[in-house]
Image (cartoon, helix red, strand yellow):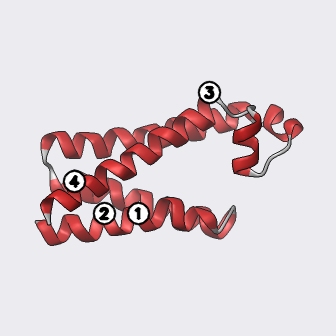
Amino acid sequence: MSLIAQVLVGLVAAIHVYILVLEMFLWRAPRTRAAFGTTEEFAGATTTLAANQGLYNGFLAAGLAWGLISDDVAFQTFFLGCVIVAGVYGALTASRRILFVQALPAALGLLFVLLAA
């Protein structure tokens, strides 16, 4: 159970590193715009906002990574909870797909972290 929990926490952290890269460095790239459903004009106008969002995703990834490195269940639980809240909010306000990309993996990770504790 513990190995599955660690893999899921690592996966959620990796997802958020990937989102950080997309939002901070590749926001204007055609593939990123396609993934987020934005136009070239919108991407140009929101580059700074997207970079800020990316930074927050990086903080989530860092917290999850620290939870893994330190084997701290409280850290893992807290940051997985943050990802779940962000994913649900994003699904309600931006795109339902966020529920499956962010919230579901985090919820599974949280379930296995708590079962392994």
The crowding category of the residue bearing disc 1, from other C-alpha atoms within 10 Å (few below 14, some 14 to 19, many at least 20), is: many
**How far is the residue under mark 3 from the one under mark 1?**
24 Å
The residue identified by callout 1 is: 105
Q: Earlier in the sequence, mark 2 or mark 4?
A: 4
Q: Amino acid at mark 4?
A: Gln
Q: Are marks 1 and 2 in contact (CB under 8 Å)?
A: yes
Q: Earlier in the sequence, mark 3 or mark 2?
A: 3
Q: What's the mark number on residue 25?
A: 3
Decide if residue 86 is on the left or right side of residue 36.
left
Q: Amino acid at mark 2?
A: Gly
The residue identified by callout 2 is: 109
Name the residue furthest right.
41
| Residue 56 rendering spot, x and y as whole percentages | 49, 41
Q: What's the mark number on residue 39?
A: none
Q: What's the mark number on residue 6?
A: 4
| Residue drawn at point x = 14 percent, y = 66 percent | 1
**How far is the residue under mark 4 from the one under mark 1?**
12 Å
The crowding category of the residue bearing disc 3, from other C-alpha atoms within 10 Å (few below 14, some 14 to 19, many at least 20), is: some
